Amino acid sequence: MSGHGPAIPMTARKSGPLSGTADVPGDKSISHRALILGALCVGETRISGLLEGQDVLDTASAMRAFGADVEQSGGGDWRVNGVGVGGFAEPGNVIDCGNSGTGVRLIMGAMATTPVAATFTGDASLRSRPMGRITDPLALFGCAAYGRQGGRLPMTLIGAADPVPVRYRLPVASAQVKSAVLLAGLNAPGETVVIEPEAARDHTERMLAGFGAALTVEDSAEGRVITLTGQPELRPQTIAVPRDPSSAAFPVCAALIVEGSDVLVPNIGLNPTRAGLYTTLREMGADLTFENERVEGGEPVADLRARFSPAMTGIEVPPERAPSMIDEYPVLSVVAAFAEGRTVMRGIREMRVKECDRIDAMARGLEACGVRIEEDEDTLIVHGRGAGGVPGGATCEARLDHRIAMSFLVCGMASQQPVTVDDCGPIATSFPIFEGLMSGLGADLVRGE
């Protein structure tokens, strides 16, 4: 079972050239944050281009449960009438965040310094994921958390009645942990300081500043130091959500490995803390170009054109790049299988605590497709078989993980034999139009085994 209903098996067969324009959904990370910060304003925030995948819809429901008026206008347009910083009401029921680790962790941060109690749960995948990395720093504010063994959902948080500001050094590069601490700091007096040794995606800092929070970012010998002054009055905003670079990765990578392909993916957010995949692909020799580069809503944006690239070669991906592409390593490992030589991905331990153990999931699935793999706790090495060289012919486990499911479908589009994914139901959490979009470009996708 997917946790979203009956399992949906899907098979990808070797495709003819992929061509056309791929209008991928809005950025998931920005969509979550727009809803949460809109709920922490007094007044109406208008959002266009919101991702309407299940993960974001669950965050919208959570904001309603905390007292905000969240209204869908149609076509990705939403309105949020917020309750102000510190204004969250106590939910009358359990908050179900579905499959979304980002959603539950950011919402926990946003409520941690308000004196209300809330119980959080999710699907089987989310309930298996540890929350201690969030609840430990939130405890420093005075928030108490009571969950299952190992710090797992279901979990009840009791927000701090008299929060104190904190100074917190991130033990690992994590945008979720950083964002949870900053959101908690909004309702704490004084200055909350987050120190990150390596820069993770910075959408929260950008958006906090846009909503009127007093926030500074400085580089120091300790790392990147973010200082937030608590208890601001956030100002409602009009937000145009750029298209998601993590979702764009799938049509882009498919175009690179399917013979004869030429695909344009417009209006993609290229925040430098998110664009590591595209830098890596170019280093491998991918025919990938950025067109119409511009800035929209404080975020760099461009149109991406990807063409079939039969001469790609394996590289060593710098480990310091991992925070800027941690969600893209699954599909990168597929591209690596169609390149010549070894692609070495180090510093990716964080992949083991995503929706599933993504290193193990990709290693086992690629091996089943005839690709030689090496791995350790922090590393994945793919021995490429060259353009058209992956045998395929396997059934791969999605493990309730949307990115694993989409990655193996991309693999099947260029493999010699079809590749089946056991359950593609979780794809709806982040990319509900994936099947129709890829089929429209020319992919041969068939539901059922």
Image: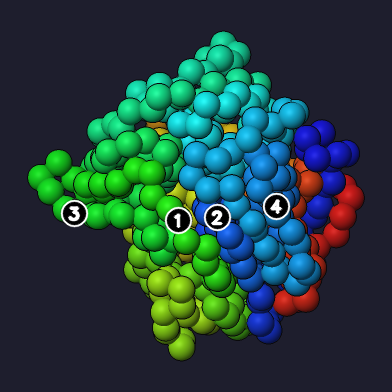
User: CA–CA distance between discs 2 and 4?
Assistant: 11 Å
Q: Amino acid at mark 1?
A: Leu
Q: Earlier in the sequence, mark 4 or mark 3?
A: 4
Q: Which mark is residue 218?
A: 3
Closest to the observer, 128 or 254 = 128
From the viewer's perspective, tell me whether residue 388 is left or right of residue 226.
Answer: right
> What is the x, y in percent for residue 36?
56, 49
Among numbered discs 4 and 1, the one appearing first in the sequence: 4
Indicate the secondary structure of the residue bearing disc 2.
strand
Mark 2 crowdedness (10 Å alpha carbons): few <14, some 14-19, many ≥20: some
Question: Would residue 348 be found to the left or right of residue 115 on screen?
Answer: left
Q: Alpha-carbon distance for marks 4 and 1?
A: 16 Å
Q: Nearer the viewer, mark 2 or mark 4?
A: 2
Q: CA distance from mark 3 to mark 2?
A: 29 Å
- Which residue is nearer to you in this view: 416 or 290? 290
Q: Specify which label sits upstream in the sequence, 3 or 1.
A: 3
Amino acid type, label 4: Asp
Q: Is residue 81 above or below residue 104?
A: below
Q: Would you name the residue on which mark 4 appears? A: 69
Q: Is residue 378 above or below residue 437?
A: above
Residue that mark 1 sits on: 234
Up/down of 297 relative to 393, above or below: below
First of labels 2, 4 by sequence position: 2
